[in-house]
Amino acid sequence: MTLLPRSLYGRLLATALIATLAALAFAAFAIGSVLDRFVMHGLDDRLDAQIAVLAQAIRPDGAIDRSRLILAAPYDDPRSGWGWRVDASGRTIASPTPPDLDAMEARPPFPDGPPFARHHRDRDDPQALDWRDRDGPRHARSLMLATPAGPVRITASAPRAIVDRPLRAAMLPLLGSLLLLGVALTIATLVQLRIGLRPLKAMRESLTAIRAGKAAALPADQPSELAPLATEINALLAENTAALANARGHVANLAHGLKTPLATLALALPPHDPDGRLREQVDRIDRAVRHHLGRARAATPGGALRVATPLAPVLADLTDALARIHADRGVTARVEIAPDLSVAVDRQDLDELIGNLLDNGWRWAASRIAVTATVGSDARFARLCIEDDGIGIAPELRGAACAAVQRLDERGDGHGFGLSIAYELATLYGGTLTLESASLGGLAAIVELPQSLQTSHSSGV
């Protein structure tokens, strides 16, 4: 299981956000480190200046000349936290708040760091010291001087807050600026992804147009990264179109080649077919031939699958015609159809599909037929439901009723070959035909056919 999102947009966005956060965190750390070194360097310079002043009070023999000791601000204020001390020959002279040598912890004066943070120091430079007392963290600089009377140690200290306060004051606006920078980078990333992935969305829309029959191939003006993919897809579409045309030609030629021998056979049958069984088989073969001819016609590239046939005129024509044909049965039909509903089915095939279902309903309805046409649960399909109040079909026989060359009426259930023709045509166009129990009490034939994405309508064949 991968933690990355499934979409390219999500993956690129997640990667960009992680990289942005890492870069901002590194920037905050690096800038904070540089600021710390810069402010600390300024404090060290002040302490070193005090050490240099105190060093002037050390005579060559190692004694301390008190007249040269200067107790200037802020070292003269016990509350300031600044202090100094001089340790020489067992004697100590210090300010009101001297550094605590026992608590000090030595550290390298300038640890390794980036080149811009390093400063050249002589070996005799003061050493940096840090410790904590009751007033908080403190920082000091200490210098050892060699004299004939022995080593002399000069130490100057200051509160660590002298460094921490300006650092905190500087880090707050710095972090705010980095946060604003992160927001700006995130917005820029979103804009970049939307612009960068737009060609993929355009390619998807082009493929939808090809499927709907509005285009035959992907546009050639693709970005360099997508151009090879578009070329391969166009080549595949061309190969599929050629293969489909070739297969359709073979089916059509075979079907046409059978029609003439079938017609001749039908004319020669009567003297040799007293009970009509042979004639029945010839009719079955003829129906299969006509069906596959229609299938070959519908599969023509750029043909029937790409037209838009409105449902309302088809239903109106068929219900009017069947009402006159079956006027003696006294069946009434109620038709409800959503406006502007069209399907991607050839008009002639749609007439045959719906005509078979309506005729089947009219033959076996007791008194009522209900026809409704709406948009399906999948908005890409139109849903047509034809119900009657007849005897219906047993659930276990409904699959057989839709099987090709299967006639349930021969076994006494009263349903004919039209259901299988309707099933084949619906499947041919990427739709479905299901048989269910009707709310009127009889059979409900439910057809789902793909809606047309075109605005123009087919007027028929």
Image (spheres, rainbow, N blue to C red):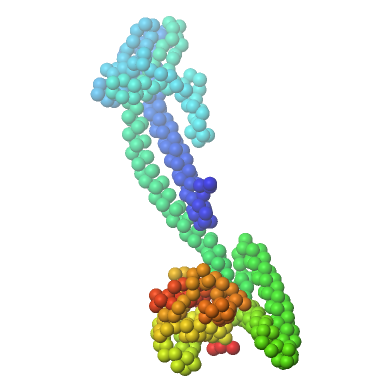
Query: Can see residue 290?
Result: no
Residue at horizontal 45 percent and vertical 93 percent from the top: 328
Image coordinates for residue 182, horizontal then vertical, percent: 43, 49
Image coordinates for residue 108, horizontal then vertical, percent: 47, 23
Residue at horizontal 42 percent and vertical 17 percent from the top: 143
Left or right of 99? Residue 247 is right
Q: Relative to 50, is 325 above or below?
A: below
Q: Who is closer to the viewer here, 126 or 161?
A: 161
Image coordinates for residue 426, horizontal then vertical, percent: 55, 76
Left or right of 322? Residue 303 is right
Q: Who is closer to the viewer here, 403 or 206?
A: 403
The quarter of the picture where residue 172 lies is top left
Residue at horizontal 34 percent and vertical 37 percent from the top: 168
Left or right of 9? Residue 284 is right
Query: Can see residue 36?
Result: yes
Q: Who is closer to the viewer here, 89 or 285?
A: 285
Q: Relative to 263, is 124 above or below?
A: above
Residue occupying the far front of the picture: 274
Residue at horizontal 36 percent and vertical 13 percent from the top: 102
Image coordinates for residue 400, horizontal then vertical, percent: 56, 72
Counting labels gives 0
